Image (tube, rainbow, N blue to C red):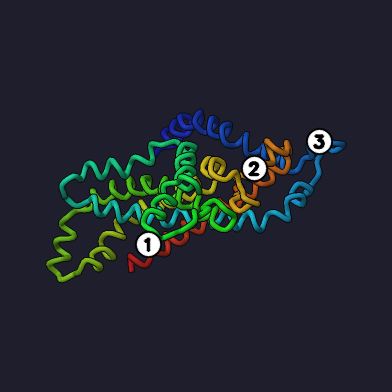
Amino acid sequence: MTASKRKRIVLSLLPLAIILCFVYGYPLASVCISAFRGFGGSSDGQFVGLENFMTISEDIPQTVTTTLIWTFGSVLPAMVFGLVIAMICNRSFKGKKVVVAINLLPYAIPLIIVASCWRFVYNSDFGLINVFLEKIGLIDEPISFLSFDTALIAVIVARIWRAIPFAFMNYYSALTTIPQEQYEQASIDGAGPFQRFRYITLPNLRATTSSTIIVLTVWTFLVFDIIFGMTGGGPIDATMTISMRIYREMFSMKNTGTASAWSLIAIFILTLITILYWKLMNSKEDDYVE
C-alpha cells in the first residue's frame, strides 16, 4: 500500500474518529472529572480528591458482590438455555417457525414492561406462580418471592427470561452456517453426539460465544429497568446493583460526584471482565488448535 493511499484512508476515517471521540470521549472525561469534584456546600465544584470514593466505600463490597451475582447469574444460564434452544430449532420439525417466534417474543418487550409482568407473576396474593402452586397443593400460604431472601433470585430469573432470545438468535444464526458435511464425516468416523458437539459445534461457535457473552455481560451489568420496576433496589438493598446506586446518588441524593464515582467503578469492573473474557476465549482457541 502506497503512502498516498494510506493517507487517503486515514483522512476518510478522520471524521468518524472525531465523532466517536466526541460521543464517547466527552462523557467519559466529564464523569472522570466529576468523580473528583465536590457538589454542594462549600466544596461545590472544587477538587476533593478521593472524598467521593471514601463516601461510598462502605457500600462498595456489598454492591459489587450483588452486581456480579446479578450479572453472571443471569448471563451464563441465558447463554446455556439459548444454545440448547438454538440446537433444538436447528433441526427440522413441525411447528418450527412458531417455536422460533415464541422464543424471540421476550426480546420484543421493553424492559420496564418485563418488570411489570414479572412483578405480577410474583405477586403474593394473585400471582400466577402462587396460584398455580396452591392449586396443585404444594403450598398452603403464598410465597413472597420479592422478599429480602429471594428478591435477587427473582429478578435474575426475569433477566434470564429476557436475555435468552438474544443468545438464541446469535447461536441459531451461527449453527445454520456450520457445514453439515462436517457432521456427516464425523459420524462416518464413529464420532458420537457428544464428540460432534465438542469437536465440531463448539469450535464453530467460538466467535459467536465470545461476542454474545461480552455484549450480554455489559448489558446485564448496566440493566436498570428490571430491578427498578420490580424491587427498586430493595428490600433493604437486597437487589441494589451499581446501576441502581448510580440512579439513587444522581436523582435521589442529587450528588453527581458519588454517582460519577460509582460510574468509574462500573467502567473499571466491565473493562476487567472483558479482558478476562478475551484471555479465556484465546486460551480456549489455543486448546482447539492443539
The location of residue 211, given as percent across then percent down, is 41, 49
Give the secondary structure at mark 1: helix
Residue 183 horizontal side relative to residue 260, left or right: left
Which residue lies under the disc numbered 3?
40
Question: Where 247 falls versus 237 (above or below)?
Answer: above
- Residue 41 position by quadrant: top right
Q: Mark 3 is on which residue type?
A: Gly
> In front of the other: label 1 or label 3?
3
Residue at 33% of width from left, 48% of height from top? 168
Q: Residues within 10 Å of mark 2 (few under 14, many from 20)?
A: many
Residue 236 horizontal side relative to residue 218, left or right: right
Which residue lies under the disc numbered 1?
285
Q: Residues within 10 Å of mark 1 (few under 14, many from 20)?
A: some
> Mark 1 and mark 2: span between their CA atoms?
37 Å
Which residue lies under the disc numbered 2?
246
> Mark 1 and mark 3: span between their CA atoms?
52 Å
